[in-house]
Image (tube, helix red, strand yellow):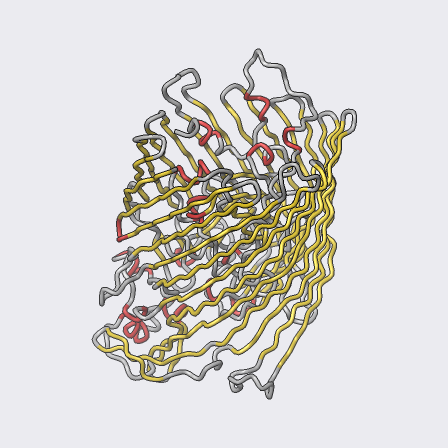
Amino acid sequence: MRRKLSLTVLGLVSTYIVSAQKQPNEKPLDSIQKLDEVIINSNQIFGSKYVASNRTGSAYYLSPQELKKFGFTDINRALRSVPGVTFYEEDGFGLRPNISLRGTSPERSAKITLMEDGVLIAPAPYSAPAAYYFPSVGRMQAVEILKGSSQVQFGPFTTGGAINMISAQIPNTFSGEVRAGYGSFDTQQVLARIGDSKENIGYMVEFLNYGSDGFKDLPNGNNTGFDINELTAKFKVKTDADAKLQQSLEAKFHYYDERSYETYLGLTENDFNANPYSRYAASQDDRMIAEQIQLMLTHTLEFSKNMRLTSNGYYNRFSRNWYKLDDVIFNGDKQGISTVIADPTTYADHMNIIRGDVDSSADALLVKANNRVYYSKGIQTKFDYHWFGDNTFHDLEVGLRYHYDEEDRFQWEDGYSIINQNMSKTSNGVRGAQGNRISSAKAFAAYAMYKLKYDKLTVTPGVRYENIILQRDNYGSNDPSRTGSDLASRENKVDVFIPGIGVNYAFTNAVSVFGGVHKGFSPPGSSDGEEAEESINYELGSRFAFGQLRGEVVGFYNDYSNLLGSDLAATGGTGSLDQFNAGEVAVSGVEVLLNYELLPNNKSFKLPITFAYTYTNTEFLNSFGSNDDLWGEVTEGDELPYIPTHQFNVGLSLEHTKYELNINGRFNGEFRTMAGTGSIPDIERVDSNFIIDMSAKYHFTKNLSLTGNIINLLDETYAVSRVPAGLRPGHPFGGNLGFEFRF
């Protein structure tokens, strides 16, 4: 093995006092250490667990060893051990994640800052932030999660936090790896990577294929899975090692294509109870075709070991057409699929058509082509300078970014009939009739952050500035050529300062406390005068290390003065993406993270155990009726939907130089799908679940390992959501065998 795997599980503790790992006879570290004050890779937030553990705010670094332990391909499973992260699943494979940080709205992860290699990666992060594209965790080297105070460096979303996915880096020496696996439901993954560095150049090339036939069943036996191919290439040139002025230029190219046969159509309560893995016949032609291209240039200029200037230029293009059932017509009565699934008794005739139990007339099923193209491009630069005093450390970081993004909608709806449970197209929709508009955003952002370490005290004040112009040009349903004959335009401008400050005090090498306060912000929509989402966020926590026990306890309180909701089809809305005011909301909670080594004195085996717990309490502080009833009629005191009150994760590993065995259990508490209080009505509840996963490795040599994992060991049948339209199941029992070869 390349390193002791005990470090792998110790890494599951997001933050701890590194000095507490020393042996009793070792000299304690001084309070001001140069070790953690090096300027890390410019495209990373932390770059290591040590740096993450010394921030004044809550931070977590998912290391390469942790990601490889279970061979994660589902981002939901990768993030399950991080307290403060909540999510609800949708497809069972993590293709379209719904992630929340500290109680932000989880729908399509639209309220958190998502990055890859330090660059915004959502298709249109300002104008249409819903993450219909999410970087594949299977090709990532590490994942960084930042919550709480001192996050003014990253935006535009500053309420819950930021997630930065770190792609494979160019290696220092010639090396590579091949990982492959195959298992249940014809699920397969192949990753091949090779790279090298010389004195002045370096490169890395990587290919990933990930696919499955899916675990759901259509009456005609069609595929319900997906197939994804990705190609990443990096090339770097740099100055000689002895050059007075160190410079480097790195080019990155990434290509992604996806064909998946996923649907918005879930199941009624009775049908889910009878056969949770079935799909209705009317969803047989539903599919997503997507393609993404990313180009990125990173220039680094090191004036000295203490001073660096980093600039990124980036361009992302993401196109997708999610062709899926939207409406059902019976005797001229047109109903959306979410309405029919929610009340199958009232709409029994519509349900019969959806199931394919009866033959329908022409155009009884309307399948919408949700055809969209997203662009995101910009340039950003960051200056970092640090210096030392007699007993102090100072760091100043200043960043600027100019960004443009847009969403181009050009949608239509085709008509189908269903006969003998087979669908046939009966009409072609008018192009642009179901959406013909361009939403765009221009944004200038700047921030400054100062860090002062004096003796045992660390203080990090900072401020962020966002200037945003949001526009929408709607060409209307009768102008497919976009001549502008029926053009309707609107514009909204935002100008905001976002301050924050974090503090950390180390009482000893084993115990520290930290806390902070910062302003939370989320951009509004393009409607003139629509206000941004704003909040004041507080946190107070402690990191500790006593013997073999290490951990962190944090309390947080987010005080929203104006929470925004979004009209997303993914949550049962119309899909307009218009935002609406939800008023004042309070979100509070507690996060606990513990790690304990059960065999500290055993030289042959390690047996670490980890525990993570999140308690989240949400409350509307005013009453209102939400647009299109997305959250229903809200009364003061109601809880937010989609956020469980309790969740915890337990992990146990048996580690030896020749093999390892890992088991992980995740409890997701029940949550409501409509705002409310008290006991949750059956039709508005997603029940709690406890899912156990396992993984194992056997190392034939230091270069070759046999791998295996099991998803949902106990084969629990459980629902993960009731949106977009009906109950949806989690992944059933599934096994996988594979190998890893490194050179």
Where is residue 254? Give x, y as percent. Answer: 48, 56
Where is residue 159? Give x, y as percent. Answer: 62, 50
Residue at 49% across, 76% down: 410
Residue at 60% across, 34% down: 51
* Frontmost residue, 394 versus 492: 394
Q: Residue 603 appears in which quarter of the rendering?
A: top left
* Frontmost residue, 34 versus 251: 251
Q: In this view, which residue lies farthest toward the right?
A: 390
Q: Residue 343 appears in which quarter of the rendering?
A: bottom left
Image quarter in which the C terminus is found: top left
Judge left or right: residue 536 versus residue 356.
right
- Name above or below for residue 308 compared with residue 527: above
Q: Residue 405 appears in which quarter of the rendering?
A: bottom right
Residue at 52% across, 59% down: 294
Q: In this view, which residue lies farthest toward the bottom?
A: 485
Judge left or right: residue 701 versus residue 460.
left
Image quarter in which the N terminus is found: top left
**How many numbered circles does the render carry?**
0
Residue at 66% across, 75% down: 490
- Name above or below for residue 398 compared with residue 512: below
Judge left or right: residue 240 versus residue 178.
right
Q: In this view, which residue lies farthest toward the left?
A: 420
- Name above or below for residue 22 compared with residue 293: above
* Frontmost residue, 332 versus 578: 578
Where is residue 559? Give x, y as percent. Answer: 65, 49
Where is residue 426? Give x, y as percent. Answer: 32, 83
- Name above or below for residue 102 compared with residue 291: above
